[in-house]
């Protein structure tokens, strides 16, 4: 049986998971692949800390260059994270003719074009399945399984930290801060949780999915990103009363030559499959012209689930090497780079949930209703809601509105005018409805 | 760009979907694959009927041999169905050096070993992604994405007809016959629905999944199959009261050297992702040692969703051809053929739902409780339930029992003794709880 040597850069959580999986399931993997995958070296600055994996003597080294230069290593697995050192090592590995497997969404979202170009020139593979969705095989499925589909739409719950916080806010009605503290306690959130809760982790993944689905690199600066830091548990509870769950959603949708890519909290109807996704689990719903709705669900992060996808990628590359040729050099096609563009934020159309804190006086509904109408925003339901316990703003009542589909720019113009009119007492809340 | 010729055998529902997809999304497919896939010929005995697809002049022929013999066709797509003619054509295509894509689960479940052996000798690929789960990429994900996992367990809702009937029985409380008639009306069930409702369609798919996951051919005769034909809406409603949905489930689970493979109606807790799978949709929950729980959900049948997966397979084979070598000749590994075997039906352990129609008299609970205890079946809850409207058996009351995990053989011995004891008035009902 052919043998392929693998080296890992970064012996952190995922690195340890990949090492453990490759060592433990080596035989099964070889049976399935018809190729033997041999873990040869792991590089990490810290060679002392116990990661709970028993490595053969001499496998763990300090110097990444030693892994990249090893002639018996054909596949370099980058699991360092971050965008500086990791990029440097990946480009050096490519230059040395190594195939690369990475789980680094931030790096690919920012410098994917450069990395794939280098790989194309060097004739090597760059696989990145674990950079979106952890254990969920969404990259593979978009690239291969759905190759025959025009992708019409993707909705994803792509950050387990946020989904855990939102699940606790929804099911147990606890406020954001308490839910975040709990997530930190359980190790689901970092000490500095901003990358997760401000939506940027989700945005990096959305950029990769949009690029894969539509064949052009989506510039990070053009993605509309809202996190959940300012989400009030009041709105989570009102959404529940209306029959919705609040989820941090990545939405990607093609409309002619424009592709909408945005990230933000959104209301999902309770019967929808995405509403059943609880806790740290992730899910992606893809709508293709042939396949219709398809959902992939699983653990979006964590040592073993992420390792599962990294090892699946290693297996593909090993088979490619055994077969004599890399296959997906242009892992993200740029065939549509010329004629597709990101839809401007204001042009996005959606149904919206709105909460206004209005003066409790006759004529209020008439006032905001008239302003919405003037801007072409059509109201489906509008109801004043009782205060939730703990709410302490006086002399106002919350009015919750569901709109028919409206342009976001029109909605925002209407909300600005409503604020100027003096009918509301604080900043209106607006979220999409799926 | 390299060009690969494709021929289709069978211009029925799926054949028409594949032809339409290949013609309509040709450009997108070529962009993604880096290979042009060209549909050249379709063979069907009926060359007259309008399938709603506009084919170029001369593409539709009557004789399958003409497709197989065409030197410009490298991939033969078998979509005839059935196990006789289809096997003959597939073996002839393989002998002629053609790669094969098929969606024929019955054929592969019965004669897969023979077909894969022939393909291995001829050095050609046989892809069969659409034979399980229609538009759901479960075959691809098991074979590639989860290659590094030991698969511990698979639970699948694999038949849309049954799931549609069960959804209507559950949500609208209508009896089986009416739900079946409705499914036939809507075109979801055949005039002769036995393959679906007796569980054999699900069993064929379970055999393929088990064989893929564990590397040995599961003999059809050893699979325990129960359909939904005799399922009473009373039990669906009682299950609902206990917080469960009834689903026709394929269950595959490894336990040492034995693999459980069975198909039957089972109770799924309401919060479980599989409980949210409604109507004609299918879903598969896989539990791997690395990935933990993963669910794939989508349309399990139908023209376009099945075509989506068939085209994904065609794309893989086209890339394999362009790369110079077939990759998955032994699509189902037989590495474990020697030492794995199917677990005998009686040895399966599970929690069970049981309904007994007992005499309404003191001592009844003591009588069946003692018998269960004697056979080592431990009761978790036992409650007498009110009759559901329409129930007409007199002088008995329904007692519904949830057990702790028990061996099926012990459960059946207990139920046989309970019947002999005279405490029940009709056949007990027993279903697994997931």
Image (spheres, coloured by chain):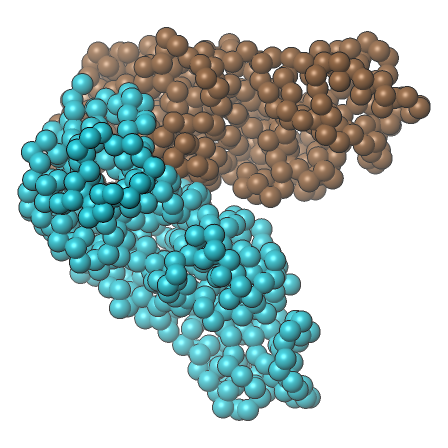
Chain colours: A brown, B cyan
Residue at (54, 73) in percent of width and height: B354
Residue A170 percent location from the top left of the image: 68, 38
Q: Residue A228: in sight, yes or no?
A: no
What residue sits 59% from the left and 70% below the top? B234
When asked about the image quadrant of residue B258, the answer is: bottom left
List x then y, in percent, for residue B191: 39, 61
Figure quadrant of the N terminus of chain B: top left
The correct choice, above or below, for B331 with respect to A183 in the image is below
- Quick check: A418 above or below B119? above
- Residue A206 position, x and y percent, is 47, 23
Considering every residue shown, the one lying at the far front of the view is B48
- Residue drawn where x is 34% and y is 58% of the image: B201
In the image, is A333 to the left or to the right of B39? right
Residue nearer the viewer, B131 or A119: B131
Q: Position of residue A107 (x, y in %)?
A: 41, 16
- Could you tell me which residue is drawn at 59 percent across and 20 percent down? A349
């Amino acid at each position: 049986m052919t043998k392929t040597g693998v080296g890992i850069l970064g012996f952190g959580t995922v690195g340890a998971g990949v090492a453990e999986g490759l060592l433990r399931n080596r035989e099964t993997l070889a049976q399935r692949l018809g190729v033997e995958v041999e873990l040869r070296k792991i590089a990490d600055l810290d060679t002392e800390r116990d990661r709970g994996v028993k490595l053969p003597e001499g496998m763990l080294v300090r110097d990444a260059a030693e892994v990249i230069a090893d002639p018996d290593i054909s596949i370099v697995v980058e699991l360092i994270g971050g965008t500086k050192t990791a990029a440097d090592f990946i480009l050096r590995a490519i230059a040395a003719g190594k195939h690369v497997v990475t789980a680094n969404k931030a790096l690919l979202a920012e410098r994917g074009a450069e990395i794939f170009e280098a790989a194309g020139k060097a004739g090597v593979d760059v696989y990145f399945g674990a950079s979106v969705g952890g254990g969920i095989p969404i990259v593979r499925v978009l690239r291969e399984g759905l190759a025959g589909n025009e992708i019409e739409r993707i909705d994803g719950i792509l950050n387990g930290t946020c989904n855990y916080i939102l699940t606790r806010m929804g099911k147990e009605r606890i406020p954001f801060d308490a839910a975040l503290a709990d997530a930190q306690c359980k190790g689901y959130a970092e000490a500095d949780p901003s990358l997760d809760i401000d939506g940027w982790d989700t945005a990096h993944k959305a950029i990769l999915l949009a690029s894969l689905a539509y064949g052009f690199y989506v510039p990070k600066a053009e993605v509309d990103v809202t996190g959940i830091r300012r989400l009030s548990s009041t709105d989570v509870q009102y959404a529940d009363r209306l029959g919705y769950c609040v989820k941090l959603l990545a939405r990607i949708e093609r409309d002619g030559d424009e592709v909408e890519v945005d990230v933000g909290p959104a209301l999902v109807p309770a019967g929808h499959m995405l509403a059943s996704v609880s806790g740290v689990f992730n899910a992606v719903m893809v709508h293709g012209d042939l396949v219709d709705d398809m959902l992939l669900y699983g653990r979006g992060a964590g040592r073993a689930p992420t390792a599962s996808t990294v090892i699946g990628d290693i297996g593909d590359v090993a088979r490619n090497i055994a077969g004599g040729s890399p296959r997906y050099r242009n892992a993200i096609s740029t065939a549509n780079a010329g004629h597709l563009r990101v839809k401007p934020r204001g042009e996005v159309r959606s149904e919206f949930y709105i909460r206004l804190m209005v003066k409790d006086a006759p004529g209020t509904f008439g006032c905001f209703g008239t302003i919405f109408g003037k801007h072409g925003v059509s109201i489906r339901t509008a109801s004043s809601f009782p205060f939730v316990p703990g709410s302490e703003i006086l002399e106002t009542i919350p009015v919750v509105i569901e709109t028919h589909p409206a342009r976001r720019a029109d909605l925002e113009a209407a909300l600005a005018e409503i604020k100027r009119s003096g009918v509301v007492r604080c900043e209106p809340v607006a979220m999409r409805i799926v």
